[in-house]
Image (cartoon, rainbow, N blue to C red):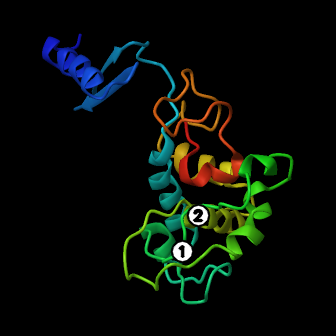
């Protein structure tokens, strides 16, 4: 049974962050406790950019940090993609990535657009949040594994960690906030934020 202070803190957090639902879990010494406000503790949420550390773990397993990307200028290395220090724009303004859903590999289908992304500054001149770098890292990882990004992530990161409920299958609740989009998350964007 959860300590009432933990449950009260969970409720206070939900109110402070103005979220309609919140599920928390902790594990200490093999003891697992969960709490939820506005939903069931087993509710599956879209975790958005928390996907990036999982993509980074996959890239570290399959790629060398000093490998060039083959997409952007030769000085851009895998480490620049993962640390948001490539100097390139973080989004694709010219295409709607959801239109790539019908292609066999949406990550590969967006490569021509990624090749034309604007470079704002040189390497390591500043930190700039770049989803685009994670799309390239996801694509490179899939190629290195000889599978899709989703298959590689499941086999090399999610399954070994015992994350049985973590996948790219739809969330139980829709996202909230100004940037939350309805409908399924585009496969072309999954390495930067598609996990549930």
Q: Quadrant of the C terminus?
A: top right
Q: Residue at the spot x=27%, y=20% of the render? A: 15
Please determine whether, in this image, residue 52 is positioned above or below residue 128: above
Q: Is residue 70 visible?
A: yes
Task: Return the residue at label 1.
Answer: 88
Q: Residue at the spot x=80%, y=48% of the render? A: 99
In whole angstroms, how far apart are the C-alphas of marks 1 and 2? 8 Å
- In the image, 119 versus 187, the foreground residue is 119
Q: Residue at the spot x=54%, y=44% of the render? A: 158
- In the image, 92 versus 110, the foreground residue is 92
Q: Residues within 10 Å of mark 1 (few under 14, many from 20)?
A: many
Quick check: 79 left or right of 117? left
Q: Residue furthest bottom?
A: 74
Please determine whether, in this image, residue 34 is positioned above or below residue 76: above
Residue 69 x/y as whole percent: 62, 79
Residue 23 x/y as whole percent: 37, 22
Do tag 1 and tag 2 residues touch (Cβ < 8 Å)? Answer: yes
Q: Residue at the spot x=43%, y=13% of the render? A: 39
Task: Return the residue at label 2.
Answer: 132
Quick check: 92 left or right of 96? left
Question: Number of labelled discs?
Answer: 2
Q: Residues within 10 Å of mark 2 (few under 14, many from 20)?
A: many
Residue 82 x/y as whole percent: 47, 67
Q: Quadrant of the N terminus?
A: top left
Q: Dot 2 lies on which element? A: helix
Q: Dot 1 lies on which element? A: loop
Q: Is residue 32 visible?
A: no
Quick check: 55 left or right of 155? left
Q: Residue furthest left?
A: 5
């Amino acid at each position: 049974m959860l300590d009432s202070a933990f449950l009260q803190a969970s409720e206070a957090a939900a109110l402070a962050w103005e979220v309609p639902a919140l599920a928390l879990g902790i594990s200490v010494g093999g003891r697992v406790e969960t709490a939820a406000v506005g939903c069931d503790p087993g509710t599956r949420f879209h975790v958005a950019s928390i996907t990036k550390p999982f993509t980074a773990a996959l890239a570290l397993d399959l790629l060398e940090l000093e490998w060039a990307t083959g997409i952007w200028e030769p000085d851009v290395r895998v480490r620049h993609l993962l640390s948001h220090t490539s100097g390139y724009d973080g989004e694709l303004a010219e295409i709607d990535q959801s239109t790539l859903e019908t292609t066999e590999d949406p990550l590969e289908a967006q490569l021509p657009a990624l090749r034309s992304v604007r470079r704002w500054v040189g390497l390591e001149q500043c930190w700039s949040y770049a989803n685009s770098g994670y799309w390239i890292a996801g694509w490179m990882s899939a190629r290195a594994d000889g599978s899709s990004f989703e298959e590689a992530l499941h086999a090399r990161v999610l399954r070994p960690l015992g994350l049985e409920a973590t996948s790219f299958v739809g969330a139980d609740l829709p996202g909230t906030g100004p940037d939350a989009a309805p409908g399924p998350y585009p496969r072309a964007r999954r390495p930067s934020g598609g996990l549930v």
